[in-house]
Image (tube, helix red, strand yellow):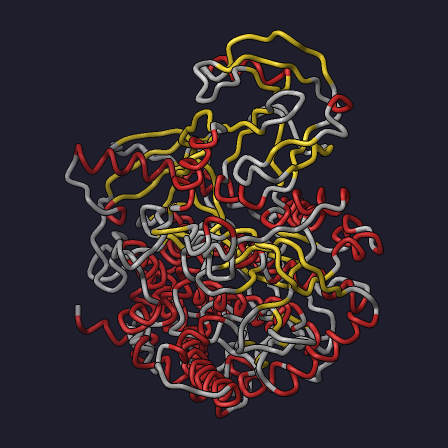
Amino acid sequence: MNSYKDTVFLPSTKMPINANLVQNEQKIYKEWEENHVYKRMKRDGKNPFVLHDGPPYANGDIHIGHALNKILKDFVVKFNYFSGRSVEFVPGWDCHGLPIEQKILSSKVKLNPEEFSAACREYASGQINLQKSQFKSLGIIADWENNYETMSPFYEKMISDNLQKLFEDKFIFKRKKPVFWSWAFQTALAEAEVEYKEKTDESLYLVFRSSIGNVLVWTTTPWTLPANVAIAMNPNLKYCLATLKNPHNSESACWIAEDCFEELKRKGIVDDIFLESFSYEHFKNEHSQHPIYLDQQVPFVAADFVTADKGTGFVHIAPGHGEEDYLVALKNNLPIVVPVGPDGFFIEGKYKGIHIFEKGSFVSNPKIIEDLKETGNFVCSETINHSYPYCSRSNTPLIFRATEQWFLDLDKIRNSFDLSKELDKVEFYPENSKNRLLSMVQNRPDWCISRQRLWGVPLFDNGVLDVWFDSGLSWGILSNQADLYFEGNDQHRGWFQSSFWLSLALQGKLPYKKVFTHGFVVDGNREKMSKSKGNVVSPLNVLKKYGAEILRYWVASTDYTKDVQVSDEILKRASDGYKKLRNTLRFLVSNMPNEKLDFKGQLFPADVWILNKSKEVLDFVYDSFSKQLYFSGIQKLSEYINSDLSGIYISSCKDRLYCSSGEHRESAVFVLSKILESIVTLIAPLFTYTAQEVFGYLPEWMKEGKKDIFDLVYVPLSSVEVKFDLNVWKKILSDFHLEFDKLKTTSEIKETLEVQLEFEKEEDIFEFSSDWFGVSRTIAFSEKDFLCEFSSEGRKFKIVKSSLKKCERCWKRNAENVLCQRCEFLTQIKEKE
């Protein structure tokens, strides 16, 4: 048998079986840098595809969310490049703000303001270099030499110039009004810096005493009662006088909204109604005694936001600690009382020196309730669970606190533009993210852009700009309007929105043509990652264990339009999927001849079928990639490789590849070369290291003088005229395998080459139909005994054990002696050469 080894065409390549990704990827990336790949990707710079990079914060190692985001962006940029376009991808970093301040302050070294800023700048620069090297290790190609930084002199001047323009155009104003306030950091915060969490607190019912009768009020923020300046009621509600049940005071009657009576009675707070159908007019010019400061009087005022859904129909107004309360105060010329200082301590009145919080609880509430009981104004309290704002940096509860701040006038922008029509000009994916962003921008209050910190771009007076203002201007560094913003779905509250407002105000249009959002990374159980849970997956550890290509395969093969799962098991599956892809590419490379193939002969039915099937699949994959739906394309490509290409075609043409010659073999090689060229270029944006490796092992005639993968442009496969449709025979092949699997359990037959397949209709037999089914031969029905028979697609077949010998060259049971006729003929020719 060994004597025939030199007569067959066995696959041959120097491409190693193992990818050795961890060792090879760094070498390949270094070569790309030496060959100035990004400059080549810019081509002539005309009509570039521009992906604008939302800047990560310059602090610490990259995490798995960073890896997901940057790899997806790399897919997009490279896809457009390999489709023939010039590209522009300038990475950026957000450099100002609290985390860097905290790092410098933690050193306990006393620094003057100039030294402090210099230390922050030096620290941020070091973090940028760290993250830059880590992003490169993921295989990301970008303009790393010209990245933007929000702390660079050029960028800071751009911020200052635009700030001045907004001020001159009256888009910016200064006012004392309530804002999210972090008492831990003693600064105002923007919505994007706020997280909402479930919190358990104490709410209470109390009475405000009035000459026209006591008023029952419900509040979820007892600590704001010292700041009370009025009682609000809805002019469209009707009010009644009800009796209090088991009151703590001597007055047993109080005013409530009629629509609140049943719920308050159910709770056991009120008992009966004895006066009803009074409107706001009855209270309009009256005053009530302050429940804590008994020497003060507070007026009744009208407010449409007061409802009867919860509470009593009366709302206590503390404009120093609430946005709606503040607007009521402006309308009614009420004072803005702010008894709580920047550090969360009361700074005036009887509660001076008491902090509102301790370990996340309102420690001031019990003292206030105690005083209300003493004055006879306490009725009862109850525990509530509600969504409460927290500082995303310090993880401490926030308060609303009125302070002098600078604001971007969002109402003016809303009055200047039809926001819905502006967003209609933008393509969104997922589509419902448009409505999400529209809802946010339609309802957002004025943007507080000032911060009481040191490290940032200075404002007109004390303080610095919000870092979201910094990054919201990043579109200013682009040469063209961005084709795509691609970020996590939390950026509807963040960068998408800050860019939205500033671009409209400054250039009268939105900065993006398309907005694509991806989900967050969670663990294998769909739980949020945290160090305390021990479920954090570090991309740096994945790189050390598997290499970047496996991380990229994980990104490409998962549906990132929703939250993305990652775990050791999921990464192992990604590694297995990658190996199948690479092994298939290696097989294709191993069958490429060293000399150029100039095939002009006949394509056989299986060749035509796989070429047309490949075009159908690869066109679908390309279309999916063009829509940034890589997971959809990779799923289709994997199914095609495992089933149609490897499972059917390659299996069916191995005999032609190894044991035939002439056009029988050349047609299969020609087809595989076309498929190889297409797949390698198509996957290059996603698995660039692998595409580069495969390119390096191609014969020179296939490279056509190109030096690396970045010299290639994807060219779709051409369809081939179908003379014999094999699609129906794919179903017949499947049915054959079902029957054969049954046969293996009931007979000694174990391999398909041990049998021949007989067709009822001789005209159904097509060229290389025996290879299609993997049997030794196909013939018309004979009189021989059959092992089994089956029907499929309106045709009848018999499986018959072959009576011939096994050919020692091709292993088919077609031989009368040692070799079958085909192999005997070819070996004779080989001997004469």
Closest to the observer: 129 or 611?
129
* Residue furthest front as drawn: 295
* Residue furthest bottom as drawn: 34
At a point 69% along the width and 35% down the height, the residue shown is: 299
Residue 217 is situated, as x and y percent measured from the top left of the image, at 56, 28
Whether residue 419 is visible, yes or no, is: yes
Closest to the observer: 20 or 384?
384
| Figure quadrant of the C terminus | bottom left
Residue 779 is situated, as x and y percent measured from the top left of the image, at 38, 42
Quadrant for residue 612, please give it: bottom right
Residue 637 to residue 716: above or below: above
Exactly how many numbered labels are in the figure?
Answer: 0
In the image: residue 238, left or right of residue 216: right
Residue 751 to residue 509: above or below: above
Residue 794 is situated, as x and y percent measured from the top left of the image, at 48, 29
Closest to the observer: 99 or 486?
99
Residue 283 to residue 608: above or below: above
At a point 40% along the width and 78% down the height, the residue shown is: 105
In the image: residue 349, left or right of residue 27: right
At a point 34% along the width and 66% down the height, the residue shown is: 583
